[in-house]
Image: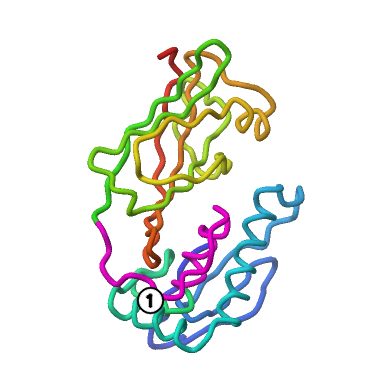
Amino acid sequence: MARIIYGALVESIRGSIGGTTFQKNKYGYTVKHKPNMTKPWTADQLLSQIYFTKAVRAWREAVLTTRQNWNTWAATNPQYAKHNPSAQLSGFACFVKWHAYEFQAGLPVDNSPALAIPAVINPVFKIILAAGVLTLQHTWTGGAEDWNVAFYLSRPFGSAQNFIGTKTRYIFSGTDATASKVITVLYPAKFGSLPALGDRIAVDFVEWMESGGAVITRQQIIVTVTAS
């Protein structure tokens, strides 16, 4: 998908031509190719859509005070569209984006998000395979559990493979507190088997404010499986 900026002679194009669709939404104009569907959505994709839909429904069912609180948060802490940095997100968009991760973690609606955004701290990861037990260790220097975190992992990468893209799958949610999570069952449930020592695994993580509001852009890193 590409973002379009029109000039003085052409103000807009909408519709489809030969499999290419021109469209407009509140965040700007886009053009994208309509691909042939080669496979159905994965279970993770379906769940993501369910959480997104649940978040939209939660906004519709929210009382006026809740909507006003989120509109105030969005005005106080401007957030911008992923594909159009000049388009500011509304209170509704911030609510839905934040709650999609909240619901994925099994957490409730936040009716009054905190206006102050806490400091963001990046972790150091280790993936440990010892005696058949697979563990994801995440260390946060100074972490104060101000952020919830969704963790995603990939299948083993080849030695020359460095592009992560969308190859990771959701594994579990936690916080920005240093911890070790045993994923001996969770990892094979997504990928069929445990990795081996020396395998390179992509780790994605998304942080969202524990007290409602901000969602930090997904970050990615490749980690080698070690014995300790």
Crowd around label 1: few <14 · some 14–19 · many ≥20 (10 Å): some
Is residue 117 on the magenta stretch? yes
Q: Residue at x 46, y 20 (%)?
A: 128
Which amino acid lies under the numbered mark 1 shown in the image of this protein? Ala
Magenta-tinted stretch: 94-118
Q: Residue 153, position in %: x, y?
A: 52, 36
- Give the side of residue 193 with respect to residue 91, left or right: right
Secondary structure of the residue carrying numbered label 1: strand
- Give the side of residue 137 with respect to residue 16, left or right: left
Q: Residue 22, position in %: x, y?
A: 58, 75
Q: Residue 74, position in %: x, y?
A: 36, 77
- Give the side of residue 211 with respect to residue 170, left or right: left
Identify the image quadrant of residue 146: bottom left
The residue at which mark 1 appears reads as 87
Which of these two is toward me, 139 or 144?
A: 144
In this rendering, is residue 181 above or below 143?
above
Is residue 129 on the magenta stretch? no
Q: Residue at x 51, y 59 (%)?
A: 102
Rendered image coloring scheme? rainbow
Q: Residue at x 28, y 48 (%)?
A: 144
Identify the image quadrant of residue 219: top left
In this rendering, is residue 134 above or below 217?
above
Identify the image quadrant of residue 228: top left
Q: Residue 106, position in %: x, y?
A: 57, 55
Which of these two is toward me, 185 or 15?
A: 185
